Every structure is written in C-alpha cells, then in structure tokens.
Amino acid sequence: MGKLDFLMRYAEANRHYDGKKIADEAMQGDSPSAKVSVLHSYFSNEKHVDIAVRDESAYVRGTAALHSKATKEHLDTLLQDHNEVVRSKAARNPNLTSDQIHRAMKDPDTYVQAKAAANPSATQEHIELALTSRHPEVRMAALRHDSIPRDRMIKFRDAEPDPYIRSVVDAQLMWRKS
C-alpha cells in the first residue's frame, strides 16, 4: 500500500482529517494509482472525474468512465476515447443517455457494443438493435439483459441459427421461470 492509499484510508476512517485536500492534491500529481485511489474514495467528486477524463493513463480514464459522478459530457468524451477498454467501461455506465447507448452500440469494437447492450439503462429499442447484430457476443449480452421479455427471448431462440446461443437462451428461460 502506497503512502497516498494509506492517507486516503486514514482520512476516510477519521473524518476530521482533511481527505478532500489530500484527494485534490493527488489528482494534480503524476501517479495513476493515486488518482484511481481518489476516484474510489469517499472524497471523490465531479471535479476529480473531470481531471481523470483528460488523464493520459487509460487506467485512470477507465476508472472515471465507471464513476457514478461521471456527467453526460464526461461520458461523451470517454465514448470517443482511442482506447477500446475505456470506451467499453464508459458503455457500462448507467448514467449514459439513450443516445449515448445508441452510439456505443455502433462502436467499431464488438466488446463496446456488447457492454452497451448490457447497460442497465438500455431500452427495448437498444436490445432489439443488439439482437440483430451479426456478432454473437452482442446478441448474448442483449439476451442477458434483465428487461428483455420472456416471449421475445423465445421468439429470438426460435429464429437463431447458432445452436450454442439457442442453448444459452434455453438456460436463461429456465432461470427466469415466470
């Protein structure tokens, strides 16, 4: 455990200790692990996410992409990141708007598309788009979404040419039993 990690944990346990000041200083530093520690801490705020979104480290940007305080503007930036892992993490963020999910589903990277299809904020329109993907990973992600209706799963299974995906749908249907 580094010095900053220790100080952040100490500040969280002892509220009289100025954890906000430590967090602000760490976000201005050069250490990606220190910045990630701040983003995971009680003291993180939107200003820290704003700094992290522009960081040179994909590790820091990816952590910012999953942050609960990431704004629409932050997520727009992260969905256009050159690193597909950062984009895939942004596609998982439940703060995404419907338009952002739709854009993520059009991403050239299949993994990003699959994460967008599995996003808890994805609508039935997004799920339908994912179910028509030529990529099995994207179709599978849509099939695992909590909001896909049972009758739609059955209809999909009956039309799906891939026997493996059909067996996954059968397993999903058995688990849902409603």
Image (tube, helix red, strand yellow):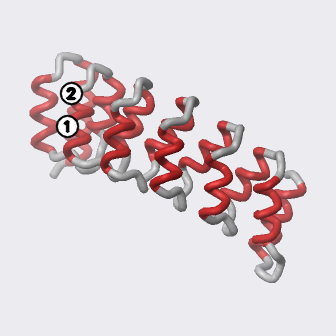
> Which residue is rendered at x = 41% and y = 24% of the image?
108
Work out which residue is located at the far right of the displayed protein and give it.
Answer: 3
SS state under label 2: loop
Q: Position of residue 129 (x, y in %)?
A: 23, 34
**Tag 1–tag 2 contact (CB < 8 Å):** yes
> Which residue is rendered at x = 76% and y = 80% of the image?
15
Q: Position of residue 59 (x, y in %)?
A: 67, 40
Q: CA distance from mark 1 to mark 2?
A: 7 Å
Asked which quadrant contains residue 86, the reply is top right
> Which residue is rendered at x = 76% and y = 56% of the image?
27
Height in image: 37 above or below 13? above
Height in image: 62 above or below 105? below
Q: Is residue 36 left or right of residue 126?
A: right
Instruction: Compare residues 62 and 172 and report the one nearer the observer.
Output: 62
Q: Which residue is mark 2?
A: 132
Instruction: Compare residues 32 and 11 and report the one nearer the observer.
Output: 32
Q: Is the residue marked by circle 1 packed among few (<14), some (14-19), or many (20+) residues within 10 Å?
A: some
Q: Position of residue 135 (x, y in %)?
A: 32, 21
SS state under label 1: helix
Q: Is residue 104 left or right of residue 6?
A: left
Q: Which residue is mark 1?
A: 128
Q: Could you tell me how many numbered marks the image carries?
A: 2
Q: Could you say which disc has been placed on residue 33 in the image?
A: none
Q: Is residue 155 left or right of residue 134?
A: left
Tag 1: residue type? Glu
Asked which quadrant contains residue 144, the reply is top left
Q: Is residue 130 left or right of residue 87?
A: left
Q: Position of residue 75 (x, y in %)?
A: 49, 48
> Which residue is rendered at x = 74% and y = 52% of the image?
35
Q: Is the residue marked by circle 2 packed among few (<14), some (14-19), or many (20+) residues within 10 Å?
A: few
Tag 2: residue type? Thr
